[in-house]
């Protein structure tokens, strides 16, 4: 990659940002299409989803007041979910899957807010549990959605 950027700079073009972007985008795409990238993306998605479910259950039980969870544990799980979500967004979601993934992400993120409506039906503990569970899943998919969204915007802008 460094050699390619240096070659680009030697040609007299001052646009270093474009060179780095082109080289890094090709590198990420090449890795994502490789067997290693596909395996890593699949495993990270499964691991991330599992962590999100476990963290959501723990946060949900904590939100109902049945059990108290240390805030550091909760924030550590959220940090791990964000990091895994970024990698999943870079490696795991293909161009063909992008629109469906973004629509599903919108549904998950809006669904977590929708569970708060259960409070009006005097279902406070159930609402707190479901809201916390779906919120953890949303924390996992949100960074991936931002990455995929930026990739879609970039691809669309390049075609225009």
Image (tube, rainbow, N blue to C red):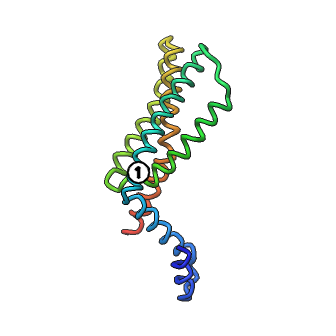
- Left or right: where 84 falls relative to 103: right
* 96 vs 121: above or below: below
**Percent position of residue 101, x then y:** 38, 45
Q: Residue furthest front?
A: 36
Question: In which quadrant is the C terminus drawn?
Answer: bottom left
Query: Which residue, given by chain and number where applicable, does mark 1 sit on?
Result: 92
Task: Classify mark 1: residues with Cα within 10 Å, few (<14), some (14-19) or many (20+).
Answer: many
Task: Examine the image and state in which quarter residue 64 appears.
Answer: top right
Residue at position x 34%, y 46% in the image = 100
* 118 vs 91: above or below: above
Helix, strand or loop at mark 1 = loop
Q: Residue furthest top?
A: 122
* 67 vs 36: above or below: above
**Percent position of residue 84, x then y:** 51, 45
- Left or right: where 160 falls relative to 118: left
Residue nearer the viewer, 139 or 120: 139
**Percent position of residue 147, x then y:** 48, 53
Residue nearer the viewer, 121 or 57: 57
Total count of labels:
1
**Percent position of residue 28, x then y:** 46, 62
* 19 vs 98: above or below: below
- Left or right: where 86 falls relative to 105: right
Residue at position x 47%, y 18% in the image = 118
Residue at position x 54%, y 22% in the image = 60
Residue at position x 64%, y 23% in the image = 69
């Amino acid at each position: 990659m460094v050699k390619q950027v240096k070659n680009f700079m030697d040609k007299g073009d001052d646009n270093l940002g474009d060179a780095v972007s082109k080289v890094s985008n090709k590198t990420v795409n090449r890795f994502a299409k490789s067997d290693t990238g596909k395996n890593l993306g699949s495993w990270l998605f499964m691991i991330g989803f599992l962590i999100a479910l476990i963290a959501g259950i723990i946060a949900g039980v904590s939100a109902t007041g049945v059990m108290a969870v240390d805030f550091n544990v909760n924030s550590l799980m959220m940090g791990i979910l964000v990091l895994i979500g970024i990698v999943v967004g870079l490696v795991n979601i293909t161009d063909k899957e992008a629109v469906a993934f973004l629509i599903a992400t919108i549904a998950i993120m809006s669904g977590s807010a929708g569970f708060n409506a259960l409070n009006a039906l005097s279902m406070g503990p159930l609402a707190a549990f479901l809201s916390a569970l779906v919120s953890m899943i949303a924390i996992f998919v949100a960074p991936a959605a931002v990455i995929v969204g930026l990739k879609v915007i970039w691809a669309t802008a390049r075609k225009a």
